[in-house]
Structure formats: structure tokens, C-alpha cells
Image (spheres, helix red, strand yellow):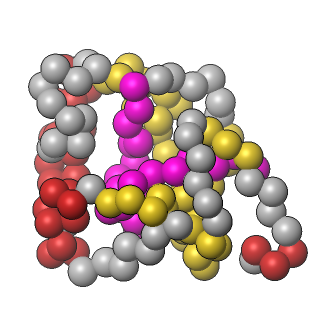
Amino acid sequence: MKAITIKQPFATLIAEGLKEYEFRTWKTNYRGDILIHAGKTIDKEAMKRFEHLNLDYPLGCIIAKVSLTDCVEIHETMKDVLRKKNYVIYEGTTESDNWHGYGFKLENICKVSPISTNGKLSLWDYEMNLNDK
């Protein structure tokens, strides 16, 4: 199954259903199920911004399964749409006003018990086995 590694706290925000777009500088044509892997690094500034949510932020493990349903270009209009949708989550997540990239639309979010594994760059394949349930 495809997987994507995401820094904390953003991986947990996705797993909790609070963040429905993941931002990248590259686009993908892939559509379908994808595992959310919480990387071993954190965004310290973002962790402070979301500490009031009192969530757990595991590292180095798969924490959710989602459906990647679309990949949209992020331009000023889309940034405004996302900020209006949820200012707390989306303000500052596109790095700067000059940032340009793509948003992966994530739906059908299902948290899973953490599965410890190393992450990789880009979309990568994770082979599920019977012990990963």
C-alpha cells in the first residue's frame, strides 16, 4: 500500500480529521488509499501552535489510513478558501505567502494503532503483514 511520511504535528492533525489537505511542492497523479506515516522529526513552531489540542504526537509510525482523492494547485484563491475553512489549521501551513505547490485532498480518514516503521521520501510502498492490524 502507498504511504507518505509527514512531520508532526501535521500527521496527527490528519489522523484526527482536522487537516484534510497535505501540502507538497510536487504533484501526484496517484489516487487511492494511502497510509499516513508520522515521521521522526517535528515542526517545533507548529507543535506550539497546536499544543492546546492536547493530542498525542507519536513519531516513526503509521497512524492512519486515508483516501487521496485529488491533487490541487495551491494558489492565493485556494489559500483563502482553506483559511476560511479552518484558519487555525491552515494559516502558516503553506510556509509563506510566496509558497507555491500542491494540496493532496485526503478523505475517509481512519486512525490505526501505531505501526512502527521507518519513513521515506515521496510516496512509498509499505508491505502490510498479518501483525500490522
* In the image, residue 7 lies in the stretch drawn in magenta: yes
Q: Is residue 60 visible?
A: yes
Residue span colored magenta: 1-25
Q: Residue at x 41, y 32 (%)?
A: 24
Residue 22 in the figure: left or right of residue 119 = left
Residue 55 in the image: above or below residue 66? below
The residue sitting at 18% across, 73% down in the picture is 51
Direction from residue 5 to residue 14 in the image, left or right: left
Judging depth in this view, the residue of 133 and 127 nearest the camera is: 127
How many numbered marks are there?
0
- In this rendering, would 120 be left or right of 129? left
Whether 73 is drawn above or below 80: the answer is: above
Q: Position of residue 106 (x, y in %)?
A: 49, 45
Image quarter for residue 53?
A: bottom left
* Residue depicted at x 36% and y 79%: 56
Q: Position of residue 37 (x, y in %)?
A: 55, 58
